[in-house]
Image (cartoon, helix red, strand yellow):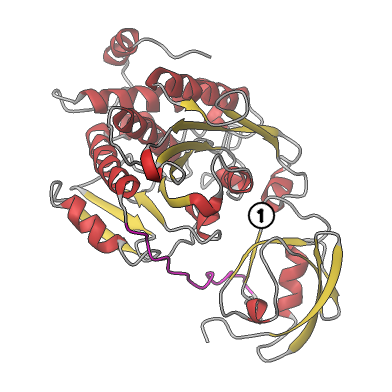
Amino acid sequence: MRHKSSVVFLLLLALSSGAAAQSPTMSTAATRILQDVSFLADDARQGRGVGTAGLDAAAEYIADRFAEIGLAWGADGGFLQPFTISESAPAAAHAGLGSVPVRNVVGIIPGKGALKGQAVVVGAHYDHLGYGGFGSLDPDSVDVVHNGADDNASGTAVMIEIARTLREKSGDNVRTFVFVAFTAEELGLIGSDYYVKNPALGNDSTFAMVNLDMVGRMVENRVAAFGAETAEEFPSLLDSINADYQLTIAASGDGFGRSDQQSFFTQKIPVLHFFTGSHEDYHRTSDDTALINADGAATVASFVADLTWALATRRAPLSFVDAEPPTMTTSGGYGAYLGSIPDMTESPNGVRLSGVRAGSPADDAGIEAGDILIRIGEFTITDLYEMTDALRAHKPGDRVVIRLRRGAEVLEVEATLGRRGG
């Protein structure tokens, strides 16, 4: 589906009783962002749920925007990176959405000079909850469209604006910019996980990743920068860029979290996730365009564009800082600690790992990212739930034999399970 012209959009916006209340002197950037949010969060997009025509229309719209800006194709034969969600992906299977075809949208600004072989990735997920059900916090609103204006039409629109800004810059030594609109984030970071397995530039050539998720409701110039602890240089870099903005930035945290930066962090890539705050409309039917602060979103776009340019032109490397995976909370506790990070995109008759925490029991045992765990002690593992049960059944200090598949081989290793946080 093609985008509407700006003139037609602004006329409709002025006439619409549901239009967001914005400053009468709204900037051109804010106007563009609001236009994009309005399209993506319109009822006609069906909440951008996996398996809907509305999600497909959103992907086409984003691809049109990339083409309009002048980005190069980032996937084979175009901007769209198609794949099919595995029917064994835990969240997708729970929601009944396995074996559904979906698409990331990938665009590129080629780099120049000595740095062009490295990439800075800027990403945002464009999917949402569709008609509710799985993931919705409106339990009585099944079959009612969840538009997801802030989550995450806002991040997608801001990413598009950043692409427009950076397309107009030039330099002699600049890393390649890769812009990715991720699909199926709400089902377990599936789109970003697929991208890091099929990147436009190799993960070992990815300098940093910047994620935009829920950046449309800024209040009093406050913004969070999660992942600020994933590179030693990030706090001072954020401070230097902020000297021109005077935002109140809460910069903290590692690269784990329920958004797409985690897929990159598990590949040992420094990450930053920008976020303007939670609100009562999160994952509810009330997350609509009328509540978007377009001027604030434009400020975020400008700040992150400056930050991304600084990353792309930086000559010195970043010093990556790893972190322990977060505790998986369940009513019965998670039991002993292995230090493995499950791949949430599929359960290939076992639990594939997207990463292993350095210095963890898994790391000490020689377990690697990409391994598929099929047995822990006496417990056969075919999916994440069985792995959870196996770890619950053990205690810290237990020594267990772990069977795994690595490529065509089946290996056994011994691990001494640890205590999380200990």
* Element type where label 1 sits in the image: loop
Q: Is residue 321 magenta?
A: yes
Q: Dot 1: few (<14), some (14–19), or many (≥20) neighbours within 10 Å?
A: many
Determine the residue positioned at 33% across, 67% down.
Answer: 232
x then y, percent, for residue 70 = 40, 21
Residue 379 lies left or right of residue 249; in this view the side is: right
Foreground pick, 309 / 61: 309
x then y, percent, for residue 136 = 55, 45
Determine the residue positioned at 73% across, 42% down.
Answer: 96
Which residue sits furthest bottom? Answer: 397
x then y, percent, for residue 344 = 66, 54
- Please say if 275 is above or below 269: above
Query: Given the image, on which type of amino acid does mark 1 rest?
Result: Met
Which residue sits furthest front? Answer: 114
Q: Which residues are magenta?
A: 316-331
Q: Which residue is mark 1?
A: 344
Q: Quadrant of residue 22?
A: top left
